[in-house]
Image: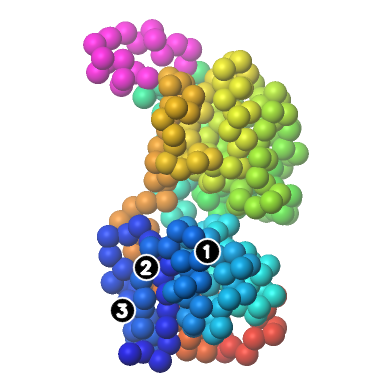
């Protein structure tokens, strides 16, 4: 038995062997479960030294039950499953992996954009159902010279901007946390959110999900968008007010949507979005490639291993704790 206990609260991978190998080298015993509720997490993790989390709720109630925990590590860039304030109050580090799947998600967002532009899904479905007629795709607008609007200008959005610019698109963005100089260096114009909505032919969502961004894109934003605009979301479903999106599509305030994420996953089959020909739906897959999954697993486990060995991990969400905790720098 290891001198540390690390609980993986839940996971959807075929194997967790890479994590086990890294954590066992750090002297940890790994307990892997599939928790769905607070109570299930508390039961298995209350005496854990470290936690790895994917989707199970790590709430204040869970965190305040933890007796030995030093770190909660999230599989992913986002950390909306974890109450970071509660973790900070209890001197527990929260980590994520900020540099994984940057190419995968930006590639996927651009694939959704160009598929929407060229009507690839509609044409594919028509041909397979026996209709050979390019006219059903009309209108198609030239991509070069069109405007990509970004809601959020973090790493993934910056990767996407470069790819769009290579196709001759102009890029504008809303992000109150990005310095103007950074945007200028990327040849991106920073605007207020509604100004981005007005300018964009394609609006791609890239903000984290938190209390400030839930429902960020709603009725007002859709009313500001062009009638030929398409909204793309590879971030988190609840950033878009789905009821407002459905209304905007039904009223033809916008031309379409391409969504890798939705408010409730998996999407319910009676959701109106499922029946709309101008909506592309994917099953929250933009993060995935064999390479990105392995990166994520190793880096998440290494975050925990570092802390158990007395070092600050590479990726820290609640950085204010660094001054209070006595860990060494690698």
Q: For mark 2, what is the residue? A: 33
Q: Quadrant of the N terminus?
A: bottom left
Task: Give the Cα separation between the discs numbered 3 and 1.
Answer: 27 Å
Q: Nearer the viewer, residue 196 or 244?
A: 244
Q: Nearer the viewer, residue 5 or 187?
A: 5
**SS assignment at label 2:** loop
Mark 3 surroundings within 10 Å by alpha-carbon count, few (fewer than 14), some (14 through 19), many (20 or more)? some
At 44% from the left and 74% from the top, the residue drawn is 44
Q: Which mark is residue 21?
A: 3
**In this rendering, is residue 138 above or below 68?**
above
- Which numbered mark, 2 or 1, is in the foreground of this view? 1
Which badge, 3 or 2, is on the more N-terminal residue? 3
**In this rendering, is residue 306 above or below 53?**
below
At 48% from the left and 35% from the top, the residue drawn is 259
**In this rendering, is residue 181 above or below 32?**
above
Q: For mark 1, what is the residue? A: 38
**In this rendering, is residue 97 above or below 118?**
below
- Image location of residue 275, percent across then percent down: 43, 22
- Image location of residue 203, percent across then percent down: 59, 33
Mark 1 surroundings within 10 Å by alpha-carbon count, few (fewer than 14), some (14 through 19), many (20 or more)? some
Residue 54 location, quadrant: bottom left
Q: Nearer the viewer, residue 129 or 87?
A: 87
Q: Is residue 52 magenta?
A: no
Task: Give the Cα separation between the discs numbered 2 and 1.
Answer: 13 Å
| Residue 286 seen in this snapshot | yes
At 61% from the left and 42% from the top, the residue drawn is 239
Q: Which residues are magenta?
A: 122-140
**SS assignment at label 3:** helix
Residue 90 location, quadrant: bottom right
| Residue 113 seen in this snapshot | no
At 45% from the left and 70% from the top, the residue drawn is 52
């Amino acid at each position: 038995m290891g001198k540390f206990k690390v609980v993986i609260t839940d996971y959807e991978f075929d194997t967790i062997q890479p994590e086990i190998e890294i954590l066992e080298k750090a002297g940890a015993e790994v307990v892997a479960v599939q928790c769905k509720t607070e109570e299930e997490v508390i039961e298995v993790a209350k005496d854990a030294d470290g936690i790895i989390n994917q989707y199970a709720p790590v709430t204040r109630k869970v965190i305040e039950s933890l007796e030995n925990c030093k770190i909660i590590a999230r599989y992913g860039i986002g950390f909306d499953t974890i109450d970071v304030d509660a973790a900070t109050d209890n001197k527990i580090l929260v980590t994520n992996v900020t540099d994984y799947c940057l190419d995968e998600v930006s590639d996927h967002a651009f694939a959704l954009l160009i598929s929407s532009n060229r009507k690839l899904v509609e044409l594919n479905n028509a041909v397979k159902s026996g209709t050979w007629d390019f006219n059903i795709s009309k209108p198609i607008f030239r991509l070069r010279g069109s405007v990509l609007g970004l809601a959020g200008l973090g790493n993934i959005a910056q990767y996407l901007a470069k790819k769009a610019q290579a196709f001759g698109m102009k890029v504008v963005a809303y992000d109150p946390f990005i310095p103007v100089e950074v945007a200028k260096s990327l040849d991106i114009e920073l605007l207020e959110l509604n100004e981005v909505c007005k300018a964009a032919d394609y609006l791609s969502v890239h903000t984290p999900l938190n209390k400030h961004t839930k429902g960020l894109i709603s009725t007002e934003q859709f009313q500001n968008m062009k009638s030929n605009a398409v909204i793309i979301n590879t971030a988190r479903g609840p950033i878009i007010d789905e009821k407002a999106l459905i209304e905007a599509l039904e009223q033809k305030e916008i031309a379409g949507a391409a969504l890798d994420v939705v408010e409730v996953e998996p999407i319910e089959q009676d959701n109106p979005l499922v029946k709309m020909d101008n909506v592309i739906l994917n099953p929250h897959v933009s993060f995935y490639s064999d390479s990105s999954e392995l990166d994520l697993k190793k880096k998440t486990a290494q975050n925990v291993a570092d802390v158990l060995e007395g070092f600050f991990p590479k990726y820290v969400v609640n950085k204010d704790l660094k001054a209070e905790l006595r860990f060494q720098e690698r």
